[in-house]
Amino acid sequence: MYTKKYSQDIKINNPDKYNLTENIVWSSPQGFDLTMDVYSPKNISVHCPVVVMFHGGGFLIRRKEILNNMAQYIASNHNYVVCNVNYRLLRDQSNTVLFNDLIGDAFGSILWIKENIHKYNGDKERIGITGDSAGAYICAMILNLGKKIGKKEDFEKDHAFEPTYLPEYFSLQEVANKNLLDVKAAVLSYGGYDFYKFALQNAETYKNIFWWLALAKPRGVLGKKFNPIEYPDIYKAISPIYNIPDSSERKLPPQLLTAATKDRITPVRMIKEYGVALKEKNQEFEFWEHLNRNHAYLDSGRTLIAGNDFIRDGIPALKVMMNFFHKHL
């Protein structure tokens, strides 16, 4: 339903330019199928750079289809392989998914892509990641905590994440030691990066509108035992802003942080705060503001509540984003 208006517009979606493999099941944790769509350039003999996309929705709503126009536009106008990825939402599996579970899904998707993307003419050595809102947060977790790998049952103790997908011949320790979650560049669009502070305010209550939109009962995202007042460390462990490595220890790939000047969900100041944190750790990043735009300007089609339109709002941002990827992939 998100793409009816523009999926037929040749400027956005030209199927003559790409091959599309839809709904690839790349993992099934506890029987819940995780899928992705892969777009591959037609008539290109060399392996192409890869853009991996994670959708937003407050970790509670939306699926990969909300970014269909974005994926179609990149695949129709650039020689890139595009992977549009689903991860579990907190409301999935009868509202039992934990926050570390969905981060494990994102980690697993990168491992699956690196192992399999050659089948779709993608170059595993030239992977960029991008996401909007919650998807940007997920990208920041991949960048900052991609070496923090461990068993799910040990999360309370070591605050490490278990990837939902693991290549057959690698152990969890090898994934960390061999830097298998490393990517070459990232574009993080209008994300929030401090779940600890959000949890202290309203993230786990009905004051967080995303529980209403998901038709789900609010709860602790790390389980019944934990709350941010008594267990601040575990909430900070799932917050990118507290886990940026110093560049002398581990240099992160170049990042582009984007913001929207009319955004009230993740306002410009919030994105700039994350930029300050990156700068303090001497990490490379660029910053770009989308003037007079609202949150979720990359969503497909037209959105009545936010007043966004993909052609007017999304395409100008994608030109900036793709110029950044061209420089680094």
Image (cartoon, rainbow, N blue to C red):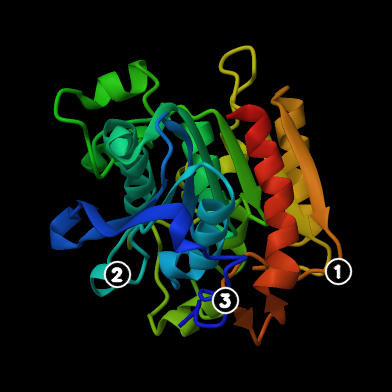
Q: To which quarter of the image does residue 108 belong? A: top left
Indicate which label's residue lies in the foreground, 1 or 2.
1
Q: Within 10 angstroms of label 2, few (less than 14), some, or many (20 or more) residues?
A: some
User: Foreground residue, 39 or 114?
Assistant: 39
Q: Residue under circle 1?
A: 292
Where disc 1 sits, the SS reads loop
Residue 249, x across and y down, in percent = 57, 14
Residue type at the position of mark 3: Tyr
State the residue at coordinates (56%, 17%). Answer: 250
User: Foreground residue, 312 or 229?
Assistant: 312
Residue 269, x across and y down, in percent = 81, 54
Examine the rendered structure and indicate whether residue 254 appears above or below residue 55.
Answer: above
Label number found at residue 92: 2
Q: Which badge, 1 or 2, comes first in the chain's sequence? A: 2
Residue 320, x across and y down, in percent = 74, 48
State the residue at coordinates (56%, 82%). Answer: 5
